[in-house]
Amino acid sequence: MNRRIAILIGLSILVAALFGSNLLESTAQISIVPTPTKTAIPPTPTWTSVPPTPTNTAIPPTPTWTSVPPTPTNTAIPPTPTWTSVPPTPTNTPVPPAAPDLGIIQTSLPDSVAEAGASISVSVPLTMSNFADLDSAMWSWGDGTSDTCPVDSALCAVDPGDGFVGTVSGSHVYGQPGVYSVQVMAVDQFGQFDMATYEFVVVYDPAAGFVSGGGWFYSAPGAFTGDPAAEGNAVFGFVSKYKRGASRPDGNTQFQFHAANLDLHSTGYDWLVVTGSGYARFKGSGTINGAGDYKFLVWAGDQNPDTFRIKIWWEEGQAVEHVVYDNGFDQEIGGGAIVIHTK
């Protein structure tokens, strides 16, 4: 404010100088009005810059990237395999001749039955490309013993025949009653071989005793081939013994399985073998329901418990058996008894 007064006084002096006393007189009449006190003016507000509200600008979608398969690199090509040279089969390798070929074993026994202590003889045809190539032949008698030739003997011998078809023969004495399987084997110098089997040689001892029995057992499904579903109790009764001086046993056997309408009656026996005091086997022939020609084999055990098995069949020629009934194993009987009578 003082600055403004000073300025006004200065201006008055300047005007007086320029315009004379008249102006001063006029000026003297001018009353100076005091400068009003300034009212406080509120300060101008400071405005903070506020960013404008964004408008809804469309945001472009995030691009989806399609997977582009990489540019293939140069795949290594497997090298061409090198082939190992296989040496040719030498033409000078000797080819072995045909293996030995054995035929069917023949015995000197009527019905393959021999009394204990008697000598039995067997033989079998043998075919070879050259008998000079035969290394050995061996008989196995089924009782734990065997005989080999050459060197030839009465127990084992080779007859080369015409050099291509010959015979291997042998003999043996069984000291104990039993049922034995006889086997022969021929081997050549190249390790080739053939085998043949004879079943069975039956050795009996008339003085060993006899067997008898009767009772029943449960016959399970499958025993009777004509109707595998048949089952139930089966009954049996038998006696088999050697009379003095006889080579065949005497007696009879009957077996009935009512569920299958099976009724076997024996017509004769082929042999009886009693081994020890607790086991016997005998073979015979018979009819079923009064007809036919059937074979049967019985296994009888005088043990604890007693056991019984029977197999019945008919034969087509001498090589094929057609089984009619077989309970399959030494089965415990359900009632009755089996007795081995020893002397």
Image (cartoon, grey):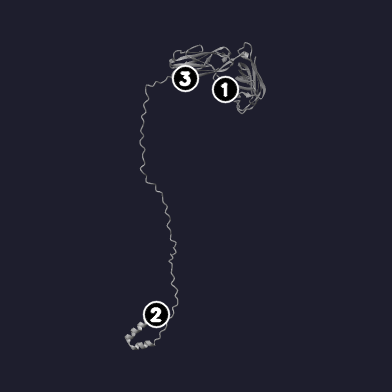
**Residue found at the very far right of the displayed protein:** 336
Q: 313 or 177, which lies in front?
A: 177
Pinpoint residue 138: horizontal percent, then vertical percent: 50, 16
Q: Earlier in the sequence, mark 2 or mark 1?
A: 2
Above or below 18: residue 197: above
Secondary structure under tag 1 reads strand
Pinpoint residue 159: horizontal percent, then vertical percent: 47, 12
Q: Which residue is mark 3?
A: 193
Q: 56 or 240, which lies in front?
A: 56
Pinpoint residue 230: horizontal percent, then vertical percent: 62, 27
Which quadrant would residue 36 be assigned to in this image?
bottom left
- Report whether 103 appears left or right of 6: right
Q: 321 or 112, which lies in front?
A: 112
Secondary structure under tag 3 reads strand
Q: Mark 3 touching mark 1, by CB under 8 A?
A: no
- Report whether 328 appears left or right of 17: right
Q: Earlier in the sequence, mark 2 or mark 3?
A: 2
**CA gap, disc 2 to disc 3?**
152 Å
State which mark lies toward you, 2 or 1: 2
Q: Which residue is mark 2?
A: 2
Bin the neighbour count of mark 2 within 10 Å (Cα to Cα): few under 14, some 14-19, many 20 and up.
few
Q: Earlier in the sequence, mark 3 or mark 1?
A: 3
Instruction: Determine the residue positioned at 32% across, 85% down.
Output: 17
Disc 3 marks which amino acid?
Phe
Q: Which label number is shown at residue 322?
A: 1
Disc 1 marks which amino acid?
His
State which mark lies toward you, 3 or 1: 3
- Report whether 269 appears left or right of 65: right
**CA gap, disc 3 to disc 1?**
31 Å
Q: Examine the rendering and report whether any part of residue 240 can be seen.
A: no
Pinpoint residue 89: horizontal percent, then vertical percent: 37, 25
Instruction: Determine the residue positioned at 67% across, 21% down.
Output: 337
